[in-house]
Amino acid sequence: MASAAQWLKYGANDKCDSIEALIKDLDSDSIGSVLELGAGSGALIAEIKRRGIGNRYYAADYSEVACRYLRENVEGVEVFQIDLTKDSPLGDYDLVVISHVLEHLEDPALCLDLICENLNFKYMIVECPLEKLLISKVKNLFRDQTINAAGHVYFFDKKSFEEILTSRLKIIKNRLYAPYSKRESLKFEFNKHQWSWIQRLMKSFTMRWGPKYFPLFWKMYWIANHAVLCAKKSEEKRE
């Protein structure tokens, strides 16, 4: 768990940058309580707390191991171990964050519907990778996309991602960006996988240099992260 937590910590800054960018036009008093769903090791909710986004912090995860790690390593965050498709954390929340969770689910639309039914909130931010872009589609002609180290089972493009959201949510604002690895996270990956120098060179290009120096190309054709600020639709509007 510690190794996975370190890797997630490297990506928390970019994800938190998206949250700050999406809520910057909201009334500063409108975000008090923040709940992260599928919080894992707690890297993102810890960064949210460190930056002072909101003033009350909650995290929920299905995994007993993840919840135990959260309670032991992230201070000032109340932790729920629940199945969010069946149970609801007590209370109302100003901001719910679901970051890089839906792509791990076989039926993300159903899960999102159930979350919206079982949870009271003012705003929700959902972020997922867009992996059904041109270059990825070409690569997938020669590989099984479902076999991947990240454990992704559902693959989005911008249209399919936003269609899932708009079934129950009203999109307010979005941010599309090309994620790239910082030097320390790339070094962490090199040490973890013991790649050859050729593999290291290729990974340096695809994980750092390419998205950093050619972000427009990367997010149009290779891979992008899409973060969306939403509000819950009323019952009348959903009908």
Image (cartoon, rainbow, N blue to C red):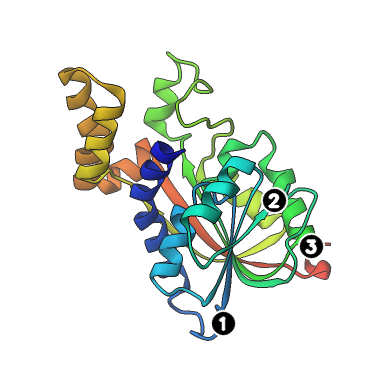
The residue under the point 59% across, 44% down is: 102
Tell me if residue 166 comes above or below residue 232 in the rendering.
Answer: above
Q: Position of residue 5 (x, y in %)?
A: 42, 44
Secondary structure, mark 2, is helix
Point out the tag, 3 or 2, that comes first from the N-terminus.
2
Q: Which residue is mark 1?
A: 30
Between the residue at mark 2 and the residue at mark 1, the CA separation in whole angstroms equals: 23 Å
The residue under the point 49% across, 60% down is: 45
Q: Which residue is mark 3?
A: 238
Q: Amino acid at mark 2?
A: Leu
The residue under the point 72% across, 50% down is: 82
Mark 3 crowdedness (10 Å alpha carbons): few <14, some 14-19, many ≥20 = few
The one nearer the camera, 113 or 6, is 6
Point out the tag, 1 or 3, that comes first from the N-terminus.
1
Secondary structure, mark 3, is helix
Task: State whether residue 89 appears in this view.
Answer: yes
Tell me if residue 9 comes above or below residue 50 in the rendering.
Answer: above
Q: Which residue is mark 2?
A: 112
Q: Position of residue 196 (x, y in %)?
A: 20, 17
